[in-house]
Image (cartoon, grey):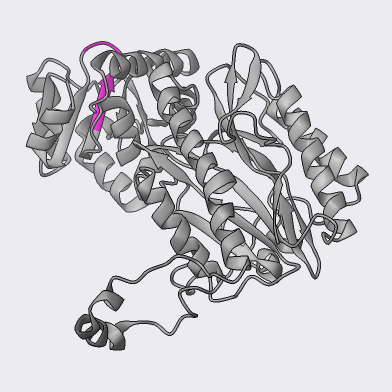
Amino acid sequence: MLTPQTELYSRIAAVRNTVHAAVPSVRGIFIFSRISIYYFSGTPANGVLYIPLQGDPVLFVRKGLERAKQECPFTHIYAYKSYSEIENICADIGLPLNPNAEYGMEQSGLTYQLARLFLSKIKAFSGRTPINIDTEIKTVRSIKSPYELEKIREAGKRQALVLEKILPVFLQQAAGGSGLPLPSLLQTCPELQELAKPCQDKYSSQKDLSELNIAKLCIQLYTELGHGFMCRMSAHGEEAFYGHIACGDNLNRAHYYNGAMGFAGLHPALPCLGSEKIWQKGEPLCVDMLFNYQGYLTDKTQCYFYGTEQELPDTAKKALACCREIQETVLNGMKRGAVPEELWLASLAAAKRFGFAENFMGFGANSVPFLGHGIGLTVDEFPVIAKGFKNPLQDGMVIACEPKIGIPGFGMIGIENTFELTGGTTKILTALPGEDSQNGIIYIS
């Protein structure tokens, strides 16, 4: 279960080479975020990782030293209580920090307050502030190794199995009158049920096709298939818990997160999963719930329609055709050497040609200026399929692309899948073999 030592040192070599190519004068780099520390060391330590351009990496651990030594193969792993100890430890092991040298720093890994504290405690930085190497770290992490790809592929397979095959069976049964299979453990013991009753929220019946009940069912199915629960995000202030489920007008409901799909969520303090709104006949339902397998994520949005294909409104059919064409463009164009910005512009042109420029990638003010995003240990990684991203794509990148269109008075139609770039081609990871992953919608009647 531990990250292989060869894998970790390969990543360290990659970040050294990338930073050196960008800023040849840098002598070493400091990493602070838990997820980047995990990526390079194999343990999500509470501390600081120092990677000199020459010499062994050093992991400083504020808490959990023994756990870090079990999970990380580095020779140099030390406990510390204050940032001021870091400089002395480096000197003691023959890696002194030079006040005249240039150093790199993962600036997004610290709050402003902690960054100021760190810089004030390291004497070598008194005359020269470390440079920002966030982009270089994101660039290195954007290229997945065979070790990482194996986990991401497994996540995609399990996610597709739930959303394309298993969940539709339960939705179909519920639509037929049998309700959702959400048994309550408390109901098996009347005494306990009565004891817990004052603490139970007055949500709709456990069998109703409410957004929340569908979310609960997804959680149960995901759990049985090995979901790892945590869905990490790297952008400051962004959060994710499994994802979102919404139906009808809730799909166009105003929100503040950096995504296209509207939703109501559980509560203003818990903007996740779903609300008490019951999915009605003639409405779309979108399930945008991430899957985590051994730390690695895939992203897929599956759209369902409560009715037959003939009953789907013409505007929704047109929006679906638009999303299909954009995904086809992605499949044909999102490969080694392609420029992300050009794919974004092509998607905008398609949306405009179909007449959906105004509500493409979100209804009204919900619209976001990107078509897709890299994904791996976190939901939001490089590259981004958006304006301004001009570095050519490379094999080994994993990207979630999500053309979505808001329709007034109806909701949203969209397709989202996670793709792997390999051998100069593009492979869908979140679709079952033989399935029409481009269909984009499953009919429940």
For residue 114, above or below residue 158? below
Residue at 14% from the left image edge and 33% from the top image edge: 68
Side of 122 where 141 appears, left or right: right
Q: Quadrant of the N terminus?
A: top left
Return the x and y of residue 355 as percentages of the image width and height.
91, 51
Rendered image quadrant of residue 435: top right
Q: Position of residue 52 (x, y in %)?
A: 27, 18
Question: Where, by quadrant of the figure, is residue 245 drawn?
Answer: bottom right
Task: Compare residues 190 and 302 and report the one nearer the observer.
Answer: 190
Left or right, 372 with reference to 100: right
> Does 60 sit left or right of 23 as displayed?
left
Give the answer, above or below, for where 171 lies relative to 177: above
The answer, for residue 392, to whether it is visible in the render is no
Q: Position of residue 46 (x, y in %)?
A: 21, 42
Placement of 121 over or under 285, stated as above or below = above
Relative vertical location of residue 203 with respect to residue 411 in this rendering, above or below = below
Is residue 210 inside the magenta stretch? no
The answer to whether one can see residue 417 in this image is yes
Q: 284 or 192, which lies in front?
A: 192
Could you tell whether 219 is left or right of 79 in the image?
Answer: right
Q: Name the quarter where the C terminus is drawn.
A: bottom right
Residue 20 in the image: state x and y as whole percent: 42, 14
Q: Residue at x 62, y 67 (%)?
A: 176
Foreground residue among 271 and 111: 271
Confirm whether the magenta stretch covers residue 50. yes
- The span picked out in magenta is 49-55
Q: How many marks?
A: 0
